[in-house]
């Protein structure tokens, strides 16, 4: 029987930030790690080979979208998600809870589950916690997420407590159904922006955490300092021997701040989404390549970057592609942005190994805040 395992291999003496290794059926993941998002079993516009070449260790796919199309039985018939999308490294699947609540304008939430209309064709669907697990079992991902109710930033205390209680009830049901040794269930901590609820949520969630725990309901519209406050609230309660996953976060500053506050895993559509809009991530801040200032700039996107785009193309050329609505422009910037976030995690790990992550964080955050926009 396969055994998931996480070990901390280095803790920075200056900051407490850490490096760990998570063993899964499809390989070992070194944390801190950024997970590119392949919502529909693909990182938008990129091939699995390109995503692998930039250094990705693990991908995220989404249960909601794959359930609606092509359907989990189609994926299962192909031999599971790894074979379906030709990806031989680990895969994490989100439960679909966030998408049900954010994409479905017509939905009804009860303790039993959620009735909602498809964001594609309006067809009616019903997902229970058990169904969310069954879909993920059919998909065959390595890490599966509990079905939860995510509330938007600004939700009041009463509604936030109701959602937290329901998430905990659903977690119990997910835990009973998630019985496959080759898959690891990550429970999700909720509680919106209320310290009391966050602490209660993590205390009641920990008994269900076997080899990982996720922090949900952040980066949902609140100011960044509020998110950092919630992470600091949770820090004393994190299990030492498990990875902590901050869901839906993927900007450079938030990742650095997250690692300072005990986070190990991140995911976000941000790097590919802003790439398609003509924006590049760099250690000097984001560059809006589509701006006229870059029309005759023949430098690479970022000096010192080893990605395919920076090795072969200039800012001027990529700007031309973006302005001409050529697909290649968004593809090249997507390659660069994902590679940048992997270079960032590599730099963070180097600083942790050298016991200087506090200094690295301060210096890098300063450069990001002063950089171009």
Image: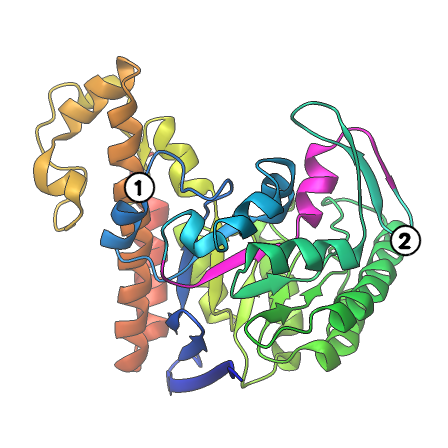
Helix, strand, or loop for circle 1? Answer: loop
Instruction: Please say whether residue 39 is one of the residues in the magenta stretch.
Output: no
Residue toward you, 360 or 201: 201
Q: Earlier in the sequence, mark 2 or mark 1?
A: 1
Question: Would you identify the image quadrant in which residue 29 lies?
Answer: bottom left
Mark 1 residue crowding within 10 angstroms, few (<14) / some (14–19) / many (20+): some
Q: Which residue is mark 2?
A: 112
Residue at 78% x, 57% y: name it. 129
* Label drawn at residue 47: 1
State the image coordinates of residue 128 (x, y, percent, origin top left): 81, 52
Instruction: Please say whether residue 107 is one of the residues in the magenta stretch.
Output: yes
Residue toward you, 144 or 371: 144
Residue at 28% x, 33% y: name it. 331
Helix, strand, or loop for circle 2? Answer: loop
Span colored in magenta = 88-108
- Quadrant (top left, top right, bottom left, bottom right) of the C terminus: top left
Residue toward you, 122 or 140: 140
Q: Give the answer, above or below, for where 81 lies relative to 32.
A: above
Question: Would you identify the image quadrant in which residue 177 lies?
Answer: bottom right
Q: CB of mark 2 within 8 Å of CB of mark 1? A: no
């Amino acid at each position: 029987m396969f055994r998931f395992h996480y070990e901390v291999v280095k803790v920075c003496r200056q900051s407490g930030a850490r490096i760990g290794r998570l063993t899964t059926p499809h390989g070992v993941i070194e944390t801190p790690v950024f997970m590119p998002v392949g919502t529909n079993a693909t990182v938008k516009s990129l091939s699995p080979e390109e995503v692998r070449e930039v250094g990705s260790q693990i991908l995220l796919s989404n249960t909601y979208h794959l359930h609606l199309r092509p359907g989990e039985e189609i994926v299962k018939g192909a031999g599971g998600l790894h074979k379906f999308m030709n990806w031989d490294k680990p895969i994490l699947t989100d439960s679909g809870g966030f998408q049900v609540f954010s994409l479905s304008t017509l939905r009804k939430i009860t303790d039993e589950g959620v009735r909602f209309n498809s964001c594609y064709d309006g067809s009616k669907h019903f997902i229970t916690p058990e169904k969310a697990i069954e879909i993920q079992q059919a998909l065959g991902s390595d890490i599966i997420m509990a079905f939860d109710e995510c509330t938007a930033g600004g939700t009041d205390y009463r509604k936030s407590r109701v959602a937290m209680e329901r998430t905990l009830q659903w977690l119990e049901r997910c835990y009973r159904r998630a019985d496959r040794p080759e898959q690891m269930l990550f429970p999700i901590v909720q509680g919106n922006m209320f310290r009391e609820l966050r602490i209660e949520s993590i205390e009641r969630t920990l008994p269900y955490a076997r080899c990982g725990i996720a922090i949900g309901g952040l980066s949902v519209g609140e100011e960044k300092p509020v998110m950092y406050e919630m992470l600091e609230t949770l820090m004393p309660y994190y299990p030492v021997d498990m990875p902590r996953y901050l869901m839906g976060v993927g900007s450079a500053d938030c990742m650095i701040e997250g690692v300072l506050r005990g986070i190990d895993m991140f995911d976000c559509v941000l790097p590919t989404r802003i790439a398609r809009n003509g924006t590049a991530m760099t250690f000097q801040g984001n560059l809006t390549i589509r701006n006229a200032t870059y029309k005759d700039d023949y430098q690479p996107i970022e000096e010192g970057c080893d990605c395919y785009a920076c090795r072969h193309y200039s800012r001027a050329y990529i700007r031309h592609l973006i302005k001409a609505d050529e697909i290649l422009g968004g593809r090249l910037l997507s390659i660069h942005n994902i590679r940048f976030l992997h270079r960032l995690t590599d730099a963070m790990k180097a600083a942790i190994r050298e016991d200087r992550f506090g200094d690295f964080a301060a210096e890098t955050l300063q450069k990001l805040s002063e950089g171009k926009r």
